[in-house]
Image: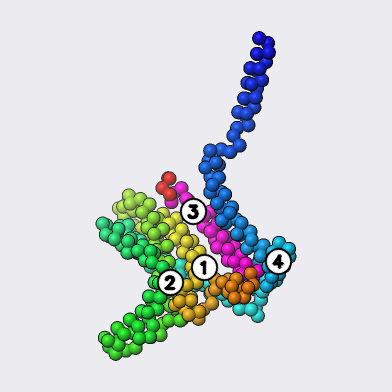
Amino acid sequence: MESHALQIQDSAISGAVKKSRGPLLTPGARCALPVIVLLLLGFAAPLTAVIAYSFAEPHSFNVFSSFSFANYAEIFNTENTVWMSFLWSLSLAAVTVLMLSVIAYPIAYGMVYVFGRWSGLVSTLFVFPLFISENVRLYGWVLFFIKNGVFDGTLNLLGGADAPEVLYSPGIILFGMIYTYLPYMLFPLVLGLSLLPRDVVDAAKDLGASRYQVWREIELPLAMPGFMIGLLLTFVLAVGAIAESKVLGGQSVIVLTHDIEVSFTYAQNWPLGSALAVLITLITGGLTLFMLFKLDLDRVLGRK
């Protein structure tokens, strides 16, 4: 009897200890484990390799065995033209975002409040080009604007005038970026405007607010989360654009992604290409973190 009682007491103590320790992983952590492993293998490991290569000796593959800031010094060397690629990429991306914010807002407003049952058709028209390769669509614009192409031939047929030369210039690159990334600005704006409470707008109108006051004081601030998501998504994609400068611009403008591609291929200078990739990652990553701190994701996802 006494030994049986001691066994029961020992089992109770061990059970209490195990219960106090709890499981090694919570249910949420166990569910997130596959995603964490995927991110480590697909994101953290390649990023670590790129960062390590950026500190290697130029034109070498001695990763993890050498340490040098020569690649970063070469980027900011005024005698080198690599820093110009940074300026072109950031400038084109910034102008693209500004112009798309002006173009996409009226369309998004119409899709939410004006088009009614035609909104689905309008959405389909903007989504459908995404199912076609970007290069195919850009080469279509080349055939449209090229000498003796569709645009030139149409003007000659109508009035006998020749079309202006627009290909292979910064302007046509900007046009291609606006055309390509319009959906990525449009649909976050649609999301932001769809979360706008109409009773607040109606109350402001009843109190005598003008249309501009309603837009400035109510619509724009409340739709700002979707607007900021569109800005962030479009800017990150536009900074990494390369097809527009190659196909439409004919490499009249050398963007950052082109220099990265050349460093990893023809030049076989992986450390320099890695340094360029690290710098642009820091810029876009810092912007992303800043935007996320400013966003109320619970409200964007409809949890509030």
Which quadrant of the rendered structure holds the N terminus?
top right
The secondary structure type at the circle numbered 3 is loop
Give the spatial CA distance, label 1 vs label 2.
15 Å
Disc assigned to residue 135: 2
Q: Earlier in the sequence, mark 1 or mark 2?
A: 2
Q: Amino acid at mark 3?
A: Leu
Residue stretch in magenta: 271-300
Q: Are marks 3 and 4 in contact (CB under 8 Å)?
A: no
Give the spatial CA distance, label 4 vs label 1.
27 Å
Q: Amino acid at mark 2?
A: Asn
Which image quarter: residue 50?
bottom right
Q: Name the main secondary structure of what is drawn in magenta.
A: helix
The residue pinned by badge 4 equals 62
The residue pinned by badge 3 equals 295
Number of residues whose C-alpha sits closer than 10 Å to that of mark 2, classed few (under 14), some (14–19) or many (20 or more): some
Residue 176 position within the rendered picture, expressed as x and y whole percent measured from the top left: 42, 73
Disc assigned to residue 132: none
Q: Earlier in the sequence, mark 3 or mark 2?
A: 2
Number of residues whose C-alpha sits closer than 10 Å to that of mark 4, classed few (under 14), some (14–19) or many (20 or more): some
The residue pinned by badge 1 equals 240
Which quadrant of the rendered structure holds the C terminus?
top left
Give the spatial CA distance, label 1 vs label 3.
23 Å
Q: Amino acid at mark 1?
A: Gly
Q: Earlier in the sequence, mark 4 or mark 2?
A: 4
The secondary structure type at the circle numbered 1 is loop
Single out the mark in the foreground, 1 or 2. Answer: 2
Residue at 49% across / 65% down in the picture? 237
Q: Indicate yes or no whether the magenta region holds residue 220.
A: no
Q: Earlier in the sequence, mark 3 or mark 4?
A: 4
Q: Earlier in the sequence, mark 1 or mark 3?
A: 1
